[in-house]
């Protein structure tokens, strides 16, 4: 389908992912554990607990790339009249949205008022909405997943579990650590670091899987292979 230097590209992404998370962790240790008064400001652009900075833009960029690859896969599937071509296309749209959300934090504007403004989950009430959407997505794509080659299906599921455990699972943990330890604590900073790390790892694993799938000749892409 596509001819892309998979190994070099993915290797570069792993280096970038590790570097960004280490710098974010280093900033958190300097500020919250060692209580440095100065110096950590140089690493503020790698703050994993904030939006609209290098970690957020990096994740948004990879999500966008995944969306682009998914779009081209859908075009290829359309030409071969694959019955799941629309699934690939809609999956691409989902990743375009996730990229935009990561870049400008759309989810932060979702507030479920039945929680109450003083409730621990008021600021993170988007987790409930996104959790329901994830459940709907998994149900809707169950047949699509079954038709994929075994290795691709397995890595789609693995990458999805890693990403969701970060975006939703660790977001819930982060809400509790912020409530009981405070936003300016090393405990909350560690929870945030794990959250962002899981998100990035999940995206890179999915990106790698997409590149591998896109490189498989159409004649070898069939159900159960």
Image: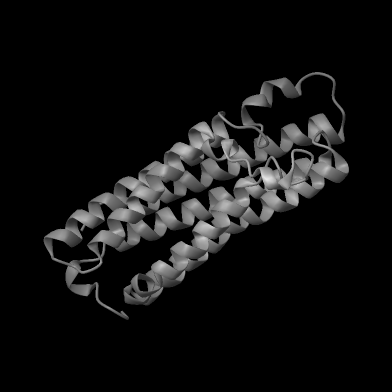
Q: Residue at x 20, y 58 (%)?
A: 1
Left or right, residue 82 beside residue 184: left
Which residue occupies the foreground of this view, 216 or 77?
77
Furthest residue in direction front, as rendered: 114
Query: What percent of the width, then of the height, locates residue 85?
Result: 23, 62
Left or right, residue 9 beside residue 33: left
Q: Residue at x 54, y 59 (%)?
A: 132
Which residue occupies the foreground of this view, 66 or 164?
164
Left or right, residue 110 beside residue 219: right
Query: What percent of the width, then of the height, locates residue 210?
Result: 35, 58
**144 over 39 or under it: above or below:** below
Query: What percent of the width, then of the height, locates residue 178?
Result: 80, 42
Which residue occupies the foreground of this view, 61 or 128?
128
**90 over 140 or under it: above or below:** above
Q: From this viewpoint, is residue 16 visible?
A: yes
Colour scheme employed for the rendering of this structure:
one colour
Furthest residue in direction bottom, as rendered: 224
Q: Residue at x 44, y 62 (%)?
A: 137
Quarter of the image holding residue 22? top right
Quarter of the image holding residue 56? top right
Left or right, residue 154 beside residue 40: left
**148 over 122 or under it: above or below:** below
Query: What percent of the width, then of the height, locates residue 41?
Result: 72, 21
Q: How many marks?
A: 0
Q: From this viewpoint, is residue 8 visible?
A: no
Q: Residue at x 75, y 24 (%)?
A: 40
Which image quadrant: the C terminus?
bottom left
């Amino acid at each position: 389908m596509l001819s892309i230097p998979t190994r070099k590209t993915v290797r570069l992404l792993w280096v970038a992912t590790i570097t960004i998370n280490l710098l974010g962790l280093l900033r958190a240790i300097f500020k919250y554990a060692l209580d440095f008064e100065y110096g950590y400001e140089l690493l503020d652009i790698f703050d994993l607990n904030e939006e609209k900075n290098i970690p957020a833009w990096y994740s948004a960029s990879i999500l966008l790339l995944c969306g682009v690859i998914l779009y081209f896969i859908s075009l290829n599937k359309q030409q071969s009249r694959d019955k799941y071509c629309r699934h690939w296309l809609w999956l691409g749209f989902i990743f375009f949205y996730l990229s935009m959300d990561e870049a400008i934090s759309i989810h932060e504007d979702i507030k479920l008022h039945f929680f109450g403004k003083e409730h621990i989950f008021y600021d993170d009430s988007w987790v409930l909405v996104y959790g329901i959407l994830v459940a709907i997505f998994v149900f809707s794509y169950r047949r699509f997943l079954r038709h994929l080659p075994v290795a691709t299906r397995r890595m789609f599921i693995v990458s999805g579990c890693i990403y969701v455990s970060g975006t939703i699972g660790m977001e819930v943990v982060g809400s509790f650590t912020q409530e009981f330890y405070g936003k300016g604590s090393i405990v909350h900073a560690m929870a945030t670091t794990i959250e962002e790390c899981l998100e990035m790892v999940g995206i890179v694993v999915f990106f790698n899987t997409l590149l591998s799938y896109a490189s498989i000749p159409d004649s070898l892409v069939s159900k159960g292979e």
